[in-house]
């Protein structure tokens, strides 16, 4: 048809060449549907309200705790106007702490304590008893009032440097906070905590007289109370990652530790310094390296064994489910519905079920992975079998080969690379999934991770385990991708 003839037809029948309504407005309709869907989701899940009421400060603090730790001294203010600096028993700074960022003026005072008199008391005894009378039933003699003299060292003035610009000056009845160019004065007395003037944005107080909370960003935070000033000073890094405060290697530099490792002078006469250092590192009570690594290996084995068993079971069942391999429609449908039953329930739910059945441990995790992946791999394998080229199978069958030989030489060469590639992908994916199901008691590092998160304090341990999981996932992802690339390339 020439151009003139085409134009003549178009003039006589313009409706034939006019674009349809869908052709003209499909892009606009699709964009409007997507926008309407997002608006519905925004309303249905109350996303605006959630974002408005979210406490981003707490979220930022949790993230900072992944890569840092806190030292938490308390400057206690006694009723008699004296002060003492107290560190917690398991503070990461170690025993007898004297950090350079906490300066204190001290003096020695002598106190005279009056111990009041006590009256004589006699506890009545029963006339008969199967046991001998205790000391509590004996007569207590009366004591007269007396005085005792104590000599102790007290703190008269303390200065806490939160960073190079911010500091807190603490006196028994007065606290001054310097944050950059701003200054906050706080009086401590019978009326509680009273700020002199308006509170800056970095200080909060719920009600007059209650504690004042000070925020110093990444440097930490502090609380001013009427009986104490509680400091939470943050440091970048993981505290005592190699050696705990009870280790003889604690507080030593890397050079000093290396020198001790090669030195013939033993810290413990029963073993070498290298053996002692390795034991202190692996059994570090703060980080529990050996236990974490064991649980991580448990997760890897759990993912591998579960995926391997699922592949072994799904492989023959997929031939039963494939319509072009097994011609019995009833058997096909029963097998496919069995696959649907297995994969319709999430692996997490199966993990809960098997945890109740077998108890907490890796067996529950292996069973959950095996059961879920058998259904998923069986469906994928059967679909791959149904899409093979029948010419190769018919060619093998035409030479009189047995049915098993037909599948071996006519079907397997087409699908085996696909089967292996999918199994490798599921193995890599299950390494991540095994971490999640471990949190419900299925064993592995997931349970360890959940225990650390429940304390709401050991977030640096959470960061450590998350980093290990990421490293393992990256390694297995690279191995899986390399193997799949080789299989696909060999097939092409």
Image: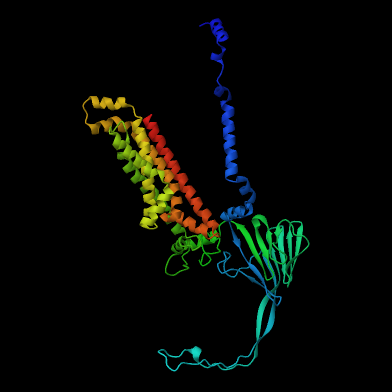
Residue 322 lies, in percent from the top left, at: 32, 34
Figure quadrant of the C terminus: top left
Q: How many marks?
A: 0
Q: Nearer the viewer, residue 227 or 180?
A: 227
Residue 15: horizontal and vertical position, in percent? 55, 14
Colouring rule applied to residues? rainbow
What residue is drawn where x is 67% and y is 77%? Answer: 153
Corner quadrant of residue 459: bottom right
404 horizontally vs 228: left or right = left
Residue lying at 74% horizontally and 60% vertically, measured from the top left: 178
Horizontal arrangement in the rendering, residue 325 relative to residue 97 (left or right)? left
> Residue at the location (63% across, 45% down)?
48
Residue 323 showing in the rendered view: yes
Q: Nearer the viewer, residue 468 or 382?
A: 382
Query: Is 45 situated above or below 259?
Result: above
Q: Quadrant of residue 155?
A: bottom right
Above or below for 401 versus 431: above
* Of residues 388 and 416, the one drawn nearer to the viewer in this rendering: 388
Residue lying at the far right of the rendered structure: 197
Whole-percent x and y of residue 2?
53, 5
Residue 443 appears in the figure = no
- Horizontal arrangement in the rendering, residue 439 relative to residue 179 (left or right): left
């Amino acid at each position: 048809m020439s151009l003139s003839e085409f134009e003549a037809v178009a003039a006589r029948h313009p409706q034939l060449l006019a674009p349809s309504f869908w052709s003209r407005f499909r892009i606009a309709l699709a964009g409007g549907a997507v926008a309407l869907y997002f608006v519905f989701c925004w309303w249905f899940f109350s996303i605006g309200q959630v974002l408005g009421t979210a406490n981003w400060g707490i979220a930022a603090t949790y993230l900072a705790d992944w890569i840092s730790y806190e030292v938490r001294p308390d400057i206690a203010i006694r009723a008699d106007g004296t002060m003492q600096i107290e560190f917690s028993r398991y503070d990461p700074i170690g025993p007898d702490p004297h950090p350079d960022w906490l300066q204190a003026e001290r003096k020695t005072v002598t106190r005279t304590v009056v111990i009041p008199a006590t009256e004589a008391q006699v506890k009545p005894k029963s006339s008969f008893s199967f046991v001998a009378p205790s000391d509590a039933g004996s007569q207590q003699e009366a004591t007269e009032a007396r005085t005792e003299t104590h000599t102790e060292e007290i703190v008269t003035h303390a200065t806490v440097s939160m960073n190079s610009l911010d500091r807190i000056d603490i006196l028994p009845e007065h606290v001054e906070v310097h944050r950059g160019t701003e200054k906050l004065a706080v009086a401590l007395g019978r009326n509680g905590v009273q700020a002199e003037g308006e509170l800056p944005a970095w200080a909060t107080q719920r009600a007059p007289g209650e504690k004042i909370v000070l925020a110093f960003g990444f440097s930490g935070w502090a609380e001013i109370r009427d009986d104490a000033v509680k400091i939470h000073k943050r440091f970048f890094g993981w505290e005592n990652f190699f050696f705990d405060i009870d280790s003889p290697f604690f507080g030593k530099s890397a050079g000093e530790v290396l020198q001790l490792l090669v030195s013939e002078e033993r810290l413990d006469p029963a073993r070498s310094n290298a053996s002692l250092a390795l034991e202190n590192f692996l059994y570090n009570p703060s980080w529990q390296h050996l236990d974490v690594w064991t649980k991580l290996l448990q997760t890897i084995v759990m993912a591998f064994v579960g995926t391997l068993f699922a592949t072994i079971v799904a492989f023959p069942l997929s031939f039963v489910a494939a319509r072009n391999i097994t011609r019995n429609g009833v058997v096909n449908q029963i097998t496919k519905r069995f696959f649907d039953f297995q994969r319709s329930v999430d692996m997490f739910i199966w993990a809960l079920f098997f945890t109740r059945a077998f108890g907490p441990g890796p067996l529950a995790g292996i069973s959950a992975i095996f059961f879920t992946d058998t259904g998923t791999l069986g469906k994928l394998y059967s679909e791959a079998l149904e899409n093979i080229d029948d010419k190769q199978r018919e060619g093998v069958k035409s030479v009189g080969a047995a049915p098993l030989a037909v599948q071996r030489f006519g079907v397997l060469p087409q699908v085996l690379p696909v089967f292996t590639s999918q199994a490798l992908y599921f193995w890599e994916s299950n390494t991540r999934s095994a971490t999640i199901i471990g949190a419900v008691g299925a064993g592995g590092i997931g349970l360890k991770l959940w225990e650390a998160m429940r304390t709401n304090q050991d977030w640096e341990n959470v960061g450590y385990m998350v980093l290990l999981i990421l490293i393992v996932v990256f390694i297995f992802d690279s191995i899986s991708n390399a193997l799949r690339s080789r299989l696909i390339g060999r097939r092409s």
